[in-house]
């Protein structure tokens, strides 16, 4: 069985970092007899500027034939902000019902963190960001536009169904981590003191599901503002975090920063039930300031490919994929100390050189 990967390299540094990760995959796959095929798809800014279309419904439907989607980044300086982000990235997350955005926050040995006195033992948690609801639904509107009476609304949508499936995923992950030696704690992050409706739905479901089905998992609740403070002051408090979409977007950039920066932050947009393909991408964007210069650090993308292989291996029951995914993470672990404390996002090596370092570490 060959793993079918759809590759959307996208804009800016996307093609450079995706190209790097695929070279690493080629080197790693052979020894483990991992068979895979890749199909390059040109969705992104350049195609939109040529055709006026981001992606059609038929093209979205065609993605269902793949086992996973590997995405570089979208965002183009000649395209109005939002067109590609909403038209491609969010569209795929929603249409393919990728309801979990999994974002590990893990400081690898040798990677500098801006947090004084904190090390790899302190910064090692995972964020489960709800990925299909909340302010991201796009409901709302503008009335009396351009007048002094202009009013805009942007609605936060929260459903028991959406919350419950996300919470169950997060509880199961906390349970799995507990079996691997983590504390077995799940922290819900919200703002229940102000968002009293959405917060109530989340909090009650969190308590009910936890008490009924995951009694061994310790339940913690933090307001999102306090969470930001704790992530900086005492990140060791966290094991597994579950968080709605908008707050999750924000706290995972903070998480990326404490774990070494955007150059190493990986993510997976998961359809955990395998009903549609999941999509994996670095947390960073198209980095137009360094695009086309062989300067982008590909580690976040290689790590996202590792998450792709581990998660797809689990969903599709393919042990070879899982094994190669674990190997990629091990190789990154070995490469990190070679940076000798320099910031990962302004490395002294080129994209190609870092790619070779990872291949050598395999
Ligand atoms: P960005 O992540 O692209 O860049 C922020 C900073 O980080 C820049 O200085 C950049 O040079 C640096 N950086 C990012 N990735 C790097 C890497 N791999 N190696 C070294 N340095 C790296 O965020 P931005 O500037 O806010 O957004 C640029 C465009 O990307 C926008 O159009 C935005 O909408 C889009 N975006 C897309 C995604 C995505 O595709 N998932 C995510 C975030 C932003
Ligand atoms: C991310 C990005 C996206 C988001 C944008 C580009 C739509 O910031 O993946 O974190 O807000 O989810
Ligand atoms: Mn973001």
Image (cartoon, helix red, strand yellow):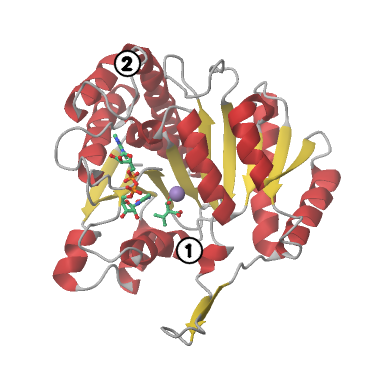
Q: Is residue 77 left or right of residue 341?
A: left
Q: Position of residue 159 (x, y in %)?
A: 68, 66
Local packing at callout 2 (Cα closer than 10 Å; few below 14, some 14-19, many 20+) is: some
Q: Is residue 215 left or right of residue 285?
A: right
| Disc with the residue nearer the chain's start (2 vs 1) | 1
**Residue 302, can we see it?**
yes
Q: Position of residue 37 (x, y in %)?
A: 26, 44
* Element assignment for label 2: helix
Between 6 and 230, the one nearer to me in the picture = 230
Asked if residue 97 is positioned above or below residue 358 in the image, the reply reads: below
Q: Quadrant of the N terminus?
A: top left
Q: Position of residue 92 (x, y in %)?
A: 41, 61
Mark 1 vs ligand 2: CB below 8 Å:
no
Q: Residue at x 51, y 38 (%)?
A: 254
Q: CA distance from mark 2 to mark 1?
A: 38 Å
Q: Which residue is mark 1?
A: 94
Between 326 and 282, the one nearer to me in the picture = 282
Q: How many numbered marks appear?
A: 2
Between 114 and 246, the one nearer to me in the picture = 114
Q: Residue at x 29, y 55 (%)?
A: 75
Between 57 and 303, the one nearer to me in the picture = 303
Q: Quadrant of the C terminus?
A: top left
Q: Which residue is mark 2?
A: 339
Asked if residue 74 is positioned above or below residue 220 in the image, the reply reads: below
Q: Residue at x 19, y 43 (%)?
A: 291
Mark 2 vs ligand 1: CB below 8 Å:
no
Q: Position of residue 85 (x, y in %)?
A: 36, 60
Badge nearest the viewer, 2 or 1: 2
Q: Is residue 54 left or right of residue 166?
A: left
**Residue 317, can we see it?**
no
* Element assignment for label 1: helix
């Amino acid at each position: 069985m060959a793993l079918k990967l759809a590759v959307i390299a996208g804009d800016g540094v996307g093609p450079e970092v995706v190209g790097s990760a695929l070279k690493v995959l080629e080197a790693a796959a052979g020894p483990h007899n991992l068979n895979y095929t890749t199909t390059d798809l040109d969705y992104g800014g350049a195609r939109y500027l040529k055709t006026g279309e981001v992606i059609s419904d038929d093209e979205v439907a065609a993605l269902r034939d793949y086992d996973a989607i590997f995405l570089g980044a979208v965002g183009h300086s000649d395209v109005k902000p939002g067109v590609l982000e909403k038209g491609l990235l969010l569209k795929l997350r929603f249409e393919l019902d990728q309801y979990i955005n999994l974002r590990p926050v893990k400081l690898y040995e040798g990677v500098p963190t801006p947090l004084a006195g904190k090390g790899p033992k302190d910064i090692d948690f995972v964020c489960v960001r709800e990925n299909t609801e909340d302010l991201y639904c796009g409901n709302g509107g503008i009335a009396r536009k351009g007048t002094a009476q202009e009013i805009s609304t942007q609605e936060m949508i929260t459903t028991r169904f959406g919350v419950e499936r996300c919470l169950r995923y997060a509880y199961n992950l906390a349970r799995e981590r507990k079996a691997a030696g983590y504390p077995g704690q799940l922290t819900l992050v919200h703002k229940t003191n102000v968002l009293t409706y959405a917060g109530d739905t989340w909090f009650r479901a969190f308590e009910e599901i936890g008490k009924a089905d995951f009694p061994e998992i310790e339940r913690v609740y933090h307001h999102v503002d306090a969470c930001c403070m704790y992530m900086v002051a005492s990140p060791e408090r966290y094991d597994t975090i579950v968080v709605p979409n908008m707050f999750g977007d924000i706290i995972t950039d903070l998480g990326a920063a404490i774990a070494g920066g955007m150059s190493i932050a990986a993510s997976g947009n998961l359809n955990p039930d395998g009903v549609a393909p999941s999509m994996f991408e670095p947390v960073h964007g198209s980095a137009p300031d360094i695009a086309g210069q062989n300067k982008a650090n590909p580690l976040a993308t290689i790590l996202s490919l590792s998450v792709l292989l581990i998660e797809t291996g689990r969903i599709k029951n393919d042990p070879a994929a899982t094994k190669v995914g674990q190997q990629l993470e091990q190789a990154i672990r070995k490469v990190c100390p070679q940076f000798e404390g320099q910031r990962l996002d302004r490395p002294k090596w080129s994209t190609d050189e870092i790619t070779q370092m990872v291949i050598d570490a395999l």
